[in-house]
Amino acid sequence: MFATLSDRLTATFKTLRGKGRLSEADIDATAREIRIALLEADVALPVVKEFIAAVKERARGAEVSQALNPAQQVIKIVNEELVQILGGETRRIRFAKQPPSVIMLAGLQGAGKTTLAGKLALWLREQGKQPLLVAADLQRPNAVNQLQVVGERAGVAVFAPEPGNGVGDPIAVARDSIDHARSKLYDVVVVDTAGRLGVDAEMMQQAADIRDAVKPDETLFVVDAMIGQDAVTTANAFLEGVGFDGVVLTKLDGDARGGAALSVASVTGRPVMFASAGEKLTDFDVFHPERMASRILDLGDMLTLIEQAEKAFDADEAEKIARKLSDKGGKGFTFDDFLDQMQAVKKMGSLKSLIGMLPGAGQMREALDSFDDKELDRVQAIIYSMTPVERENPKIINGSRRARIAKGSGTQVSEVSQLVERFFMARDMMSQAAQGKMGGLPGMGGM
Ligand code: GDP
């Protein structure tokens, strides 16, 4: 799910790499690419329009971050907007102060409601709750039986009309289930309701009647992520006919484009609360908009990294450094500045953990394990052993000075030489970057 969208978006961001500044034309071109990516993924047009307008406006420089290059800024903006359309912050179930809490499931037939009831029940049990499943889907032959099977697998009780009692009245069953839960001390009641293959007035009325009978604390609209644009129409019909508090996306394991699923929360103004990605009872979890957005953008834990960079790098300080680096081929940049930068990086956390947050870090486990954070302490010791004049003007650090510095810092002359050479190399690279030839925060590589 979302693979194509993910590929297209990451390809778009690649074209921004290395740009020192975004021109109006860059922003337009990027916006166009994102638009195509979203439309191809089946995201509803009004959502796409709003999304693009927001990204464009913000990219035009409303927020110029010192710590991020333009590509990173655009990624950050797109990510935040994605989180927004998915419903913003993670929304947890609200339980009633007086048990039992009532959760009602609504949605079309085949959306995955009955399966979801089992998943939800198991999840609730793991949260220490005592759930009761209620079979108020008396329309579909076998629905009651299916719920009983699911309940058994989840290890939870099921409230259903006695077999052979005629067709049964789903509203009465739902109402009775609440009394039953109260007397048997079940603290969460999950009501499975009937769906039809398409939206119809009778089904909607029945769902509304059940709602009035059980007064749910949460009504969840269950939608199959594979049904494409119909998801939006169906969601709107249910919002009007029954009303709901949150959305549950099912069948996220399918290989559909998934954009419709991305649109539902935005169109209805109700957050996605749970996601289901498989037929097993455990293929289910609370939905975290920010994690889903990161997954779509293939960001690893880049966002945490970006946030830490923003916190660690003071904007005024960054500008001062940038000026030093862009003037006179970067000659104004000294070992003292180098030390400050290093300390800012250290403030972000250990280098090891920083690298671990980069996308693709999983493949460099071995290299990571051999990385020594003490390296930074040695570099720091060497710089501290330099005189202020040497730090200001590293060109004068000749052989005898290197020997003295090595002795003072308890390191080898070769280490001092290496550092001095690396300093000049880093200064050249950063100076080019500052002049817009490369772009990027030192050390943040190819983002
Ligand atoms: P209901 O009519 O809304 O109660 O839908 P069901 O719970 O009966 O589900 C319809 C079909 O979708 C069943 O075959 C389920 O096994 C299947 N299903 C439900 N959730 C998922 C899911 O997350 N992934 C996959 N692949 N199949 C699912």
Image (cartoon, rainbow, N blue to C red):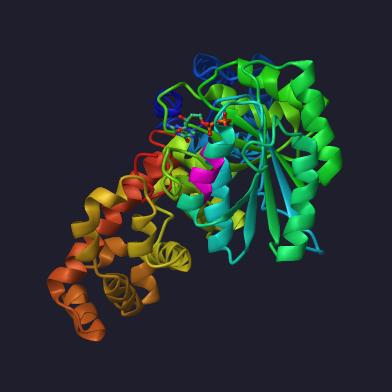
Looking at the rendering, in which quadrant would you find the N terminus? Answer: top left
Q: How many marks?
A: 0
Please tell me which residue lies in front, 303 or 205: 205
At a point 77% along the width and 61% down the height, the residue shown is: 182
Q: Position of residue 13 (x, y in %)?
A: 44, 29
At a point 43% along the width and 55% down the height, the residue shown is: 332
Q: Position of residue 94 (x, y in %)?
A: 74, 55
Please tell me which residue lies in front, 76 or 177: 177
User: Residue 217, can we see it?
Assistant: no
Q: Is residue 148 left or right of residue 222?
A: left
Is 74 covered by the magenta stretch?
no
User: Residue 128, can we see it?
Assistant: yes
Farthest right residue in view: 212
* 217 over 106 or under it: above or below: below
Looking at the rendering, in which quadrant would you find the C terminus? Answer: top left
Q: Is residue 407 left or right of residue 227?
A: left
Please tell me which residue lies in front, 145 or 86: 145
At a point 40% along the width and 48% down the height, the residue shown is: 330
Q: Position of residue 199 (x, y in %)?
A: 70, 17
- The boundaries of the magenta stretch are 146-151
* 394 over 170 or under it: above or below: below
Residue 311 position by quadrant: bottom right
At a point 59% along the width and 57% down the height, the residue shown is: 124
Is 150 covered by the magenta stretch?
yes
Q: Position of residue 300 (x, y in %)?
A: 41, 46
Residue 129 position by quadrant: bottom right
Q: Main secondary structure of the magenta part?
A: helix
